[in-house]
Image: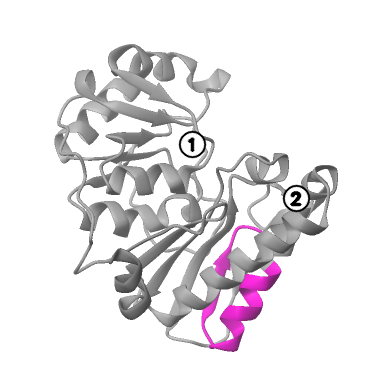
Amino acid sequence: MIAETIRTQAHPALLVTAEAASTAYREAQLKYSREQLKAIEMEGADGTPTMFIDVLVEDAIIAAARSIGVNVLSEERGWIDVGSSISLVIDPVDGSANAAAGVPLSCFSAAVVEDGEFTEALTSWLHTDERWWASRQFSPYRTSGCTNVADAAVSMLRPHARNWEAWGRVAREATRIRILSCSTIDAAFVANGAIDAFVDAGSDTHRLMDIAAAVVLVEASGGVVLDTLDRPIEFDTDLTRRWSGIVAATEELGHELRELITG
C-alpha cells in the first residue's frame, strides 16, 4: 500500500531519480570489484573524497534530473542550475563506504525544494529498493513517540576526538546505541518508529543532503529535526555549511538530546 502511495503521489522528479539511482547501483555492484568501487575518483563539491561508486550513481541521477528539467544540488557535483523553479537536494549514495564494501546499508535520498522550502522527500534503500516518502502535508508513517533518552534506542554517527565526551554522554544515557553509517536510513527509521532518534553528537559532520530529507520525512511523521547549535536547516547551495543534526521522535526527546550533547 505504501509503495502504491509513493508511485501515485510522489513528485515525478523523485521517482525518476530514485529509479536511476537503483539501476546504476545494481549495475555497479555487478560490473565492478569492491576495490574499483571504493577507489577515490575526485574531490567532491562538498570537499570530501568521491568514490567511484558515487560517480557512477550520481551521473545516472543527474542525467535523469536533466531529462525532466529540475535543478540539482549534490554533494559530488555541487549546484546544477537549469533554470527550473524545482530543485532536488540529493545524496546519490549515502553510506558510500558501506556500498563499496558490500555492506547492504546505503541509500539514495532526495528532497524537493520549492520557493526555498523542502516540500517532499524520498529515501531509497539501494540494496533492497525499499522506499520511504512523505510530503509536508502527508506521511504514511508515525514516529515511536518516545519522549526521553533513558527509554530511547538511538543511532549515532561514529565518534571523533572532537566530540568524544558528548558522544559518551548520549551513549551512557540511551537504552540502546547503533552505528549504521548511513544517516538517511537512520532518519527513515526514526520516521517509521523503528528507532527513536538519530544524532551527530556535535561533530558538525552533516551536510545539507545528509539531513534535508529528514526535515520532511520525520517532521511530517510527528518528529523533529534540530541542529545541536540551533542553526536553521535550510536550503543553501553553499556546501561548506555543516550541521550536527538531531533527528528525534518527539520534540521533548530532541531537546533532551541537545542538552546532553552540549553539556
Identify which residue is drawn at 66% across, 65% down. Answer: 58
**Mark 1: which amino acid?**
Asp
Provide the residue span drawn in magenta. Answer: 59-77
Quarter occupied by residue 149: top left
Element carrying mark 2: strand
Residue 51 tag number: 2
Calculate the distance from the C-alpha at mark 2 to the C-alpha at mark 1: 21 Å
Can you see residue 43?
no
**Mark 2: which amino acid?**
Met
Tell me if residue 103 comes above or below residue 14 in the rendering. above
Image quadrant containing the C terminus: top left
Q: Position of residue 167 (x, y in %)?
A: 42, 20
Mark 1 lies on residue:
204
Looking at the picture, tell me which residue is in the foreground, 240 or 114.
Answer: 114
Q: Position of residue 59 (x, y in %)?
A: 70, 70
Identify which residue is drawn at 47% across, 79% down. Answer: 13
Question: Which is closer to the viewer, label 2 or label 1?
Answer: 2
Can you see residue 88?
yes
Tell me if residue 185 comes above or below residue 61 in the rendering. above
Does 70 lie within the magenta span? yes
Number of marks drawn: 2
